[in-house]
Image (cartoon, helix red, strand yellow):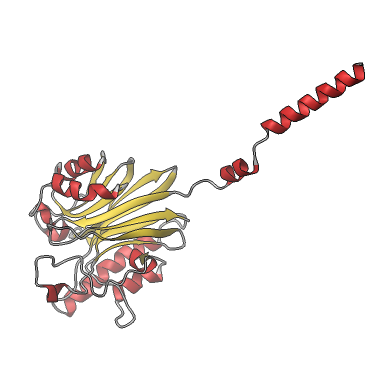
Amino acid sequence: MHAIMKLGVLLFVSVLLFSCRPSKSETTKKTHEAPIQFRAAAYNVQVSRQATPEEIGEALKPYDLDFVCFSEAPGGAWTQRAGTVLGMEHVIVGRHTTAGHVDKYKTIASKTPLSGYEEILMADTLHTVTRAVTRINGRAITIYSVHFPKGWRDQAHIDETTGKIAAFIDYLKARPAEEISVVMGDFNFTPSNADTRNMYHEMFQDIGLDMSWRELDIDVGKRNTSRVFKPEAERVGHVIDHIMYDPKKVKALDGGIVELETPLADHKPVWALLELK
């Protein structure tokens, strides 16, 4: 009888231990956690000439963004007001207005806290990049809000633009290898394609960064993100607003150009759903 009772206890303990052991699916779930995804957008808002910050926030709200970079944003509380509509209470406003123009700042709004603010000089204070770091599910993501110059008047102007973009490229090259960077805004240049190479785009490609258009297989040759109020013939192929990152660290799952029924600026917003690799 004693032996039978002892055997019964051993069987009970074995069943209890087996039932408490995590299943194979539960173990797999723990070792393969859900990937970290985030939604980002960039928008040159033309000094809010055509719309209020609240109207711009409402236009971007359906995209459920985690952060957004604005170009040509007015200073003061403008970005905070747009961010409030978007549920983004964390805001950075750049120190220097673009090209010395009145009230044209590069700004960042985010749902998650921003730290490490830096205003990166592209050779001088006329063109800068506004930088901040946020964390999504514990992973640090460095956000760069840009508005580059455009070299077009003469060779001296082209050389100046090239030097400024090269200065920012050099800054990125010196960043720690583990940094996850997302560079967004008005780049003022179109992407390279099979027919035409763009030297500025290739400068970024040379350091391992590229635009979301390529990964999303979006042909931007017949699209536009600027010159919104110009005749159609002058707009075609003028996609100069981009979201850029290192495809070895980040991949784009979705995104595109936001086509608003009523334009709110002379540019269109661009957005992307990104995932960390």
Which image quadrant for residue 83? top left
Q: Locate the N terminus by quadrant.
A: top right
Which residue appears at 77% of the width and 25% of the height?
12
Q: Is residue 101 above or below residue 57?
A: below
Q: Is residue 108 left or right of residue 97?
A: right
Q: Position of residue 53 (x, y in %)?
A: 14, 46
The answer to whether any part of residue 29 appears in the image is yes
Of residue 245 and residue 5, the one placed in the foreground of this image is 5
Instruction: Residue 25: give x, y in percent of width and height.
Output: 61, 44
Query: For the view shown, which residue lies furthest in the bottom direction?
Result: 195
Rendered residue at 68%/34% (across/down): 21
Front residue (pair 223, 251): 223
81 left or right, relative to 65: left
Q: Is residue 191 left or right of residue 78?
A: right
Q: Residue 80, position in %: x, y? A: 19, 41
- Vertical relation: 13 (above or below) 235: above
Rendered image quadrant of residue 181? bottom left
Give the residue at the far top of this rendering: 1
Judge from the rendering whether residue 265 lies leftward or rightward of residue 27; answer left or right: left
Q: Look at the image and tell me whether residue 120 can be seen.
A: no
Residue plotted at (43% across, 42% down): 137
| Relative height, residue 263 to residue 89 (above, below) | below
